[in-house]
Image (spheres, rainbow, N blue to C red):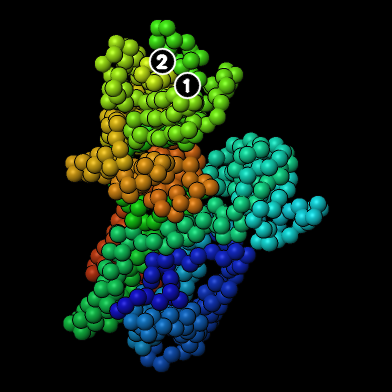
Amino acid sequence: MTSPTPTLREEETTGTPAAPERGGGAGPGLLPARAWVRPGIAAVLIGLSWLLDALTGSPATGSVLPGPADLLMVGAALVSGTPILIAAVRALRHRVIGIDLLVSIATIGAIVIGEYWEAAAVTTLFAIGHALEKGTLQRTRRALTDLVSTAPEQAVVLRDGTEQTIAATEVRQGEQVLVRPGTRVPVDGHVLAGRGAIDEAGITGESVPAEKSEGDPVYAGTVATGGLLTVLAEGIGADTTLARIIRRVEEAQDAKAPTQAFMDRFARWYTPAIIVLSVVFGVLTGDVELALTLLVISCPGALVISIPVAIVAGIGRGARDGMLIKGGEHLETSARIDTVALDKTGTLTTGRPVLTDVLPLPGRTREEVLLWAARAELTSDHPLAAPVVQAARADGLDLGQIPEQADAVVGRGVLARHGGRAITVGNQAMLRESDIADRPEAREAIDLADETARRGRTPMIVTLDDSVLGVIGLADPPRAEAADAITALRRSGVREVVMLTGDQPRVAQAVAAEVGIDTVHAGLLPEGKLDQIAALQARGRTVAMVGDGVNDAPALASADIGIAMGAAGSAVAIETSDIALMRDSLSALAQSLRLARRTVAVMRQNIVIALVTVGILLLGVLLGGVTMSLGMLVHEASVLLVIVNAMRLLRPARR
């Protein structure tokens, strides 16, 4: 027994429901008409058999030689059972002993011993159940089908000064694309001109349309609801966020969870074992019909399909809500998360710091402190540099040329020379390590910086040559939803929420107090965050790390689950994170963990349903009263029940 063939009852045999095809087959939840042809013909033959039996008064079953009514039953078994037998033979060629073989053996055996009704009933019920399963499973993959259907087909581009309507795949990178109300955005890009509203629910799950103007990003597959936008095409075809999401969901829905892999291994041994046990039982008891009934009622269909159908539905629900989960393994791990570690800047905070304080020392002016700080930061790409330069320019200060020299000191600040003057803008540690640390104004500046930090500001001390000018303070305000998101995490079952940040302890503590985080590890370099994750795991915790910065990459990789926020438009985040939240919002964090827990709960419920069903049927066979046809009816009912149970995941969760 090796890999199962994908051409058979794929959902049960391989645990992998078929992928949807764009524009082909029936729509979600609809059954292809041909799926009903064979069961329909078989049902008619069974009905004719009953009618003939009633008219002639001859027994339809149990005769030594089959009568006309019996032949109709055999015909029904052949019509509905032939595909099952073909599938069983194909599976055997791949060295797979599957459910089709169990049903085939039972059917042939029933015909041989003259149980024509049982043979017809088993195959017809199996065929009907298969058709219903296919239709129901299609609904579990509706999220992916919907995603595929949102792919734009046409685009209006400006070429040679005129508008041209072309296929979306023919848009060239760098072209200007016109987006009118009611049309889908055909490319990823940025708005060059115009104002409008875009419904981004298909990408981010956010139901409220986003206002767009010059410079804002737009994504392929989203829908313009108002305004006219001119968009610069940057990502087209397979290089769009939508295409990456579809790829990711396809891969995720087919990726097996550990429990599913165990079930597959179990089924590979369980099914042959049932055949052997039935043979032994038949030989020992001499009751062939009872042995065949055991074959039918022991079909592991519900058990094998119980996990993949839940994973497909759970991941599909996540995709609809803008949460991309990498696969079944990550879904199961996410359900066990009891500790969440968050980066501060850009995750708990807006990531857009503003200058809040300019505090000159006695004898110095506000303009003097801000001017020299801005001159030092002119060429810096540090997040705290931009608001300093912007504030100086807003005050009309002349910053002059760029500094002759500017060196960033990791974890400290910046050293610069401007017009022959030496400038430093940095934290208290930088001043303490300087030659002027012992001067009275230095101690005064450090006290002022400490007071600024206590108020939740990030202080930076400004020096010019051998003098201390003063302190500037910057604040990166917490996200509006941060406090509620932390509360929601705890309500979802998370035991501990931890902040890991490279910022100063007092600033970190102030932000943590504001959003409701108890545990803070501040002043960490990237390897420090890594150590904290390892320490939490050493305590037996299952840790999720949430971050968006390059310096979070090691911690994201080492955590049990790495979660990227605001992944829309970021190919790296979508491809590398275990969970990619398309919205740049903390509120989706608890939602994703709740979805994981719901999905795993449904998986467990499905396993119980499958095992209990087999147990009850087995008891019924041993006590008497359960026939092959009744066993098949209950078996198919249990398969449908686990599918319908999984479909509950498709409903939006209560917030």
Which residue is most to the right?
162
- Dot 1: element: helix
The answer to whether residue 49 is left or right of residue 595 is right
Q: Which residue is mark 1?
A: 372
Residue holding disc 2: 469
Q: Is residue 266 left or right of residue 108?
A: left
Q: Quadrant of the C terminus?
A: top left
Q: What residue is shown at x 32% (from left), y 77% (from top)?
A: 2
Viewer-side residue, 19 vs 212: 212
Residue 63 point in image, percent of width and height: 39, 88
In the image: residue 105, left or right of residue 421: left
- Are the residues flagged by discs 1 and 2 in contact, CB closer than 8 Å? yes
Please identify the quarter of the rendering in which residue 453 is found: top left
Residue 535: percent from left, percent from top: 21, 41
Q: Give, as a three-letter code, the residue at label 2.
A: Leu
Q: Residue at x 57, y 44 (%)?
A: 201
Q: How many marks?
A: 2
Q: Position of residue 552 (x, y in %)?
A: 36, 42
The amino acid marked with disc number 1 is Trp
Q: Is residue 35 left or right of residue 413?
A: right
Mark positioned earlier in the residue sequence (1 or 2) = 1
Image quarter hosting the N terminus: bottom left
Q: Quadrant of residue 592?
A: top left
- Mark 2 crowd level (few <14, some 14–19, many ≥20, 10 Å Cα): many
Numbered badge on residue 293 = none
Camera sees residue 197: yes
User: Which of the pair 299/329 is nearer the observer?
Assistant: 329
